Image (cartoon, rainbow, N blue to C red):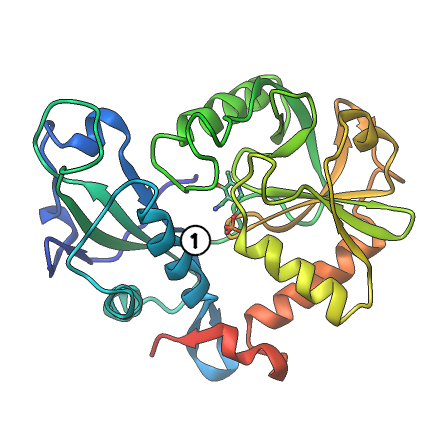
Amino acid sequence: MAKMEPAAVVYFQGKYVPTEQAKISVMTHAFNYGTGLFEGIRGYYVQDVDNILIFRLEEHVDRMVRNMNILCMEIDETHEQISEICCEVARRSGFREGIYIRPICYKSELSLGPKLRGVESSFCCYVIKLGDYVDIQKGLDVVVSSWRRLSDNAIPSRVKSTGSYLNSSLAATEAKQAGFDEAIFLREDGTVAEGSAMNLFMVAQGKLVTTPPNSDILVGITRNTVIELARDELGIEVIERPIARTELYVCDELFFTGTGAQVAPVRSVDRRLIGAGQPGELSKRLQELYFRVVQGKVEKYRNWCTPVY
Ligand code: PMP
């Protein structure tokens, strides 16, 4: 991710404190073993209402709280309090532009040993300014990674855990070093999983195809949003099934989805052009609809947008 422009205040150890005071020890369990999990939540600044709208806050908090069970985490803050803290940190930022909210639950105990049960957990949350994370206009040039997506049975891909981003970092670094914008991970069985920090959709025979929730992916909230919008607003059939690598080369359109990536068309994979080598029609329609929805412009989905101010 690009350079961070943090807000002046974060939530740390049960209080709102100046960002520079929010420090953890070198002995922190999460720092040593990657035992943290987090969310990435976008807030969109909407000029005509002079407000920031947080997109699908409830779904993000819900994913976080459910996944805490996988990492045997218990914290003092309730589900409702986590939502409120996300809003409050955003509010205290005073920002009037696009933001990214990062709530983190982590094993905060200063203790040795890679175990989960009986190790104290804590919650913190910060906010930064964030514009586009990847180019969403030109179409991305992507490469199939030589790194495999981690298996849900090894380091659960379902959990947005801090440790699992080593896997993402390896793939993204390899792709960028080779001159590509992004990577696509395959699974150990050779089928497609997702991008380094985004889910993948393919358009083939007029249908939208994406990998299922049990295919070593992080089940993205943007993914679920796009599935719903495609089905209910554009009347497009959406199929969740395994995708073979070579299907990527012969499909009509490809795009990534993610809180950071938003809806990001792909124009080539492994130097093979997808379709006409530019963002496809359906990708562009979904992208346009997505941006109207996140800005609270579509009445039916206004309840997905939580105002900050
Ligand atoms: N997969 C991975 C590995 C990710 O890091 C992300 C970003 N959170 C996604 C998919 C997309 O998830 P979401 O749409 O919930 O942001």
**Label 1 neighbourhood size at 10 Å, few (<14), some (14-19), many (20+)?**
many
Q: Position of residue 44 (x, y in %)?
A: 48, 66
In the rendered structure, which amino acid carries the disc numbered 1? Leu
Q: Position of residue 177 (x, y in %)?
A: 55, 18
Which residue position holds label 1? Answer: 130
Q: Which residue ends up furthest to the right in the rendered image?
A: 205
Instruction: Determine whether the residue tagged by mark 1 lies in a helix, strand or loop.
Output: loop
Please give the name of the residue rendered at 56% of the width and 34% of the height, measured from the top-left corner: 216
Q: Quadrant of residue 215?
A: top right
Please give the name of the residue rendered at 48% of the width and 74% of the height, measured from the top-left corner: 305
Q: Nearer the viewer, residue 96 or 105?
A: 105
Q: Does residue 143 appear left or right of residue 105 in this picture?
A: right
Q: Does residue 76 appear left or right of residue 252 in this picture?
A: left
Please give the name of the residue rendered at 48% of the width and 66% of the height, measured from the top-left corner: 55
Q: Position of residue 279 (x, y in %)?
A: 79, 47
Q: Quadrant of residue 300?
A: bottom right
Q: Is mark 1 within 8 Å of ligand 1?
A: no
From the viewer's perspective, is residue 24 above or below residue 148?
below
Rendered-image quadrant of the C terminus: bottom left
Rendered-image quadrant of the N terminus: top left
From the viewer's perspective, is residue 134 above or below residue 153?
below
Q: Does residue 199 appear left or right of residue 231 in this picture?
A: left
